[in-house]
Image (cartoon, grey):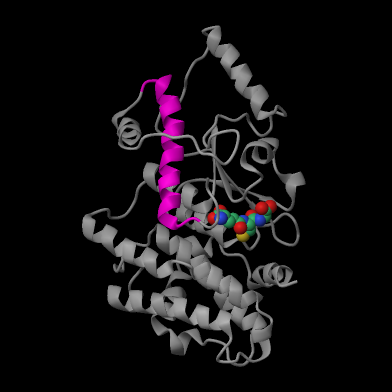
Amino acid sequence: MITRTRTTSTLFAAAIKATALCWAVLCSSSSHDSHSMAFVQSFSPTPLANGAEPRGTTIASSNSGLSSKTALSMAGGVRRRGLEQRREGATPTEGGMTLYLKAAEDGTSVGDCPFAHYIRMILEEKNLPYTVQPCASNDDKPGWLLEYYEGKMPCLRHKKEAYVESNVIAAYLDYFFPSGESDADHKAALKDAEDAMDGFFPAVAGYLKDKESDAEAELSCEPLAALREKLGALEEHLGNAGGEDCNLDGTSTSFGILDCRLVPQLYHLKVGIDTFKEHGKPDLESEFPTVHAYLSRSMTRESFVNTMYPPETIEWGWTNARQ
Ligand SMILES: N[C@@H](CCC(=O)N[C@@H](CS)C(=O)NCC(=O)O)C(=O)O
């Protein structure tokens, strides 16, 4: 079952299983190419246990007004009459992507979710066309999202498939729309980066929610100590990997999936510190200069500039979370 407490690597494994399941289903009824077959053969598909339907279930158009179950049985009916004309191959192609995500205070613009931001940065970095669909409440979510995916967001709908959990969505996008390097050294560097990032966002959330450390953080303030430890791990990783000009993989050229995950989280931290904290707060620039330089540089990337929400949206989000 996919839960928030799982490790990242487990989530990636789940992503692969989920996608393999979906592609195994597709491949069983259509011609396939070498790409999708390699995928299915490499990973044994097992059903996910977090709902009645597996991820990647064929869904009806969100505008159809039909429930997913109704649409599925209708599709089966067409198939049985031999009228089905398959237009798509087994490998996903660009286009037709919609990201359902948390809305901002106005209910219509993009909200302050760093997990959705992560996916948007990946889509931008990969130059994949997509639309966003901010949802302020369950009333705004399509029936299939509530019925089969527990209303979870961000949710990427890609044509007839849908995926939730940001790490699962990221794995799906990176598998089928790969970019960047993939040799063994690079993978080892990414593993180090992933270890350094482990538990980072929970530490950010713990600190920003902790009102006691707003006015003056005591040295013994636990959330701040936990945050400093995580920032220290990132500082060390970036320092070892290549210093001020490098991305998480140690290169200055390849801004990858992990960077897309971390940068929105650092953005939240930066705004959160400026907004809620006074004395005794961590000073990124002087205490964690490599992390600070990394964030400043990353925030100038087109993928960030095109997808950033204003600091006020982050302030609104954390103000709600702190109540
Ligand atoms: N573990 C999830 C966390 C996603 C999450 O916490 N989403 C929140 C905002 S940051 C959300 O969309 N809440 C609004 C809702 O679910 O309706 C992921 O990585 O995708």
Q: In this rendered view, identify the residue nearer to me: 198 or 178.
A: 198
Q: Quadrant of residue 140?
A: top right
Identified at 47% across, 19% down, the residue is 86
| Rendered view: 207 above or below 189 | below
Q: In this rendered view, identify the residue nearer to me: 40 or 50.
A: 50
Residue 126 seen in the current view: no
- On screen, residue 80 versus residue 193, left or right, reads right
| Rendered view: 173 above or below 147 | below
- On screen, residue 85 versus residue 209, left or right, reads left
Identified at 51% across, 78% down, the residue is 227
Total marks shown come to: 0
Measuring from the top left, give residue 188's x and y in whole percent. Answer: 27, 61
Residue furthest to the left:
184
Residue furthest to the top:
81
| Rendered view: 289 above or below 32 | below
Measuring from the top left, give residue 32's x and y in whole percent. Answer: 35, 25
| Rendered view: 193 above or below 147 | below
Which residues lie in the magenta part?
6-31
Q: In this rendered view, identify the residue nearer to me: 102 or 240.
A: 240
Identified at 47% across, 61% down, the residue is 261
Give the prevailing secondary structure in the magenta stretch. Answer: helix
Tell me the quadrant of ligand 1: bottom right
Measuring from the top left, give residue 47's x and y in whole percent. Answer: 48, 34
In the image, is residue 9 part of the stretch drawn in magenta?
A: yes
Measuring from the top left, give residue 30's x and y in whole percent. Answer: 41, 20
Identified at 29% across, 76% down, the residue is 240
Residue 185 seen in the current view: yes
In the image, is residue 82 part of the stretch drawn in magenta?
A: no
Image quarter in which the C terminus is found: bottom right
